[in-house]
Image (cartoon, rainbow, N blue to C red):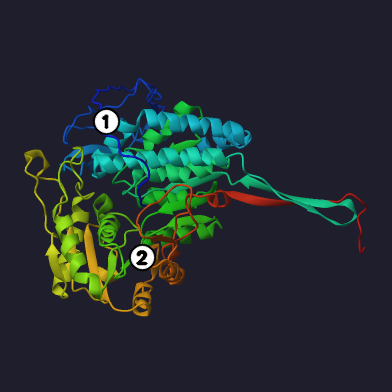
Amino acid sequence: MAGLRGVVAFGIRYTKYSFSLPQMPSHRLLKTVRLAVRNTSCTFARSACSGSREIRDPLNFWCGGRVRIEHVKNSEPVYEPATGHVLCHLEHCGPPEVDQAIKSAQAAFRQWSKMAGMDRARVMLEAARIIQARREEIAEIEVVNNGKSITEARLDVDSARLCIEYFAGLACSLAGQHVQLPGGSFAYTRREPLGVCVGIGAWNYPFQIAAWKSAPALACGNAMVFKPSPVTPVTAVLLAEVYAQAGVPEGLFNVVQGGQDTGTLLCQHPDVAKVSFTGSVPTGKKIMEMAASGVKPVTLELGGKSPLIIFEDSDLENAVRGALMANFLSQGQVCSNGTRVFVQRALLAQFLEEVVRRTKAIQIGDPLLEQTRMGPLVSRPHLDKVLGYVAQAKKEGARVLCGGEPFVPADPKLREGYYMSPCVLDDCTDNMTCVREEIFGPVMSVLAFDTEAEVLQRANDTSMGLAAGVFTKDVKRAHRVIEQLQAGSCFINNYNITPVEVPFGGYKASGIGRENGQVTMEFYSQLKTVVVEMGDVDSLF
């Protein structure tokens, strides 16, 4: 999941919102009322800086409202990356809660799937309108829970809205084919929804991923039960409230919180028709195995170790910009990032000088401030993991040109946050750990190359194939190289641009299926063939 789409808008609105739960009998689950667009209800106060949030509302959502689990067997703290403070406590869903959410989705599916595509489109467009109205609020909550800069978070919210708008436009496009047969007989096909789909999201684009998965599912007439990452559980429930406010049937988009056990319950539930997952390759393989036991289709958007190839005739300014976008977007926590930067030897010195200068100038700090361009990594364990990769790279002979160290902001309330300085590694070789494994942090590995044939062989020498990029002024070479790169999402003279109109996904171990683009409608629907006999049955018996 990656990329930018939209226009940056500046100017934060600061308003306080309060919300309290209704009193319910003890034998029933406690549900919150829906959020109204203009009377938004959340138990946090919006402010210009990090460290003032505490979320007390339940984060599970089904049957049209937030749900507090009565007898919680498993809960865990959720941290604000910018400060290291506890943001909220996550209540994990067990078998009873998962079953309730899926039954709620089934009931909604029966109503939603019978609606005309135009009617579904109207509801989805209303959801997009609500997201636009709440853009700043959703973006700020995303920052608080994920740590990315407010500038990026706004664009993520825009991408979510655009995705819903795009698939609303395709909701009327589900159509079949008419085939004429001999003797006046004929056949036709029907494209029909699957049923209850499960979406499992990653922590790097929480709100955007929830929209990218739910929009095509709903456009095709399905219902969805979505499980966010337990690291970033907060904003998916906002999308559920948006859909409810827009007028979807109660239960059409539900949110269940939890970790691996909850995900297993969802994947193995007999009433789930499809699973769509974004995350790591090892987890994707496990989900594929679980889905296979029920012969359920899967969409898997997994990891990458993508090459970015910069030829000596490239525009240096654009190549440097592309390399920075390919490595430091969302603190480097992007699966499609071009972290193996191959630079033709004649341009290498100039490239390194400029990319190091630009990297050192990246402003690190409070992600809610407009001037910040890099916030904290998502968690303390992940920060330690990324710093460990830098230490390993140095042991293996790579040269650190800048960064790769813990960063302590001047603001006292940010000193327990999970910050590091963006890193550029030189003298990298193909067999180094930093070049072979997905780091998922702000670490750029630069490798020199001499010939086109050589760099193509090296670029493809990986088990993953999510993305790839080429910078060159030679149009023929650009297309020739892209044709031979083994990757599903490729860029020429740019990187990490993901308009919702085009498919996104990978080759090899980077996944199965696609997200976005018209083709995604096929992954959330099934084809029925109907043969109509207009004459007598010609029987052999």
487 sits left or right of 373 in the view = right
Question: Label 1 amino acid?
Answer: Arg
Q: Nearer the viewer, residue 497 or 261?
A: 497
* Whole-percent x, y for residue 479 in the image: 45, 67
For this view, does 336 lie left or right of residue 421? right
**Circle 2 SS class:** loop
Question: Which residue appears at 47% of the width and 47% of the height?
Answer: 198
x then y, percent, for residue 138? 32, 34
Q: Position of residue 104 (x, y in %)?
A: 51, 35
Query: Can residue 63 be seen here?
Result: no
Instruction: Pick whichever, 79 or 165, lies toward us.
Output: 165
Numbered mark located on residue 20 in the image: none
User: Which label number is shown at residue 56?
Assistant: 1
The residue wearing badge 2 is 473
In depth, the one of 428 and 217 nearer the eye is 428
Q: Is residue 301 above or below residue 250?
A: below
Q: Residue at x 23, y 28 (%)?
A: 46
Q: Quadrant of the C terminus?
A: bottom right
Vertical comparison of 41 with 444: above or below: above
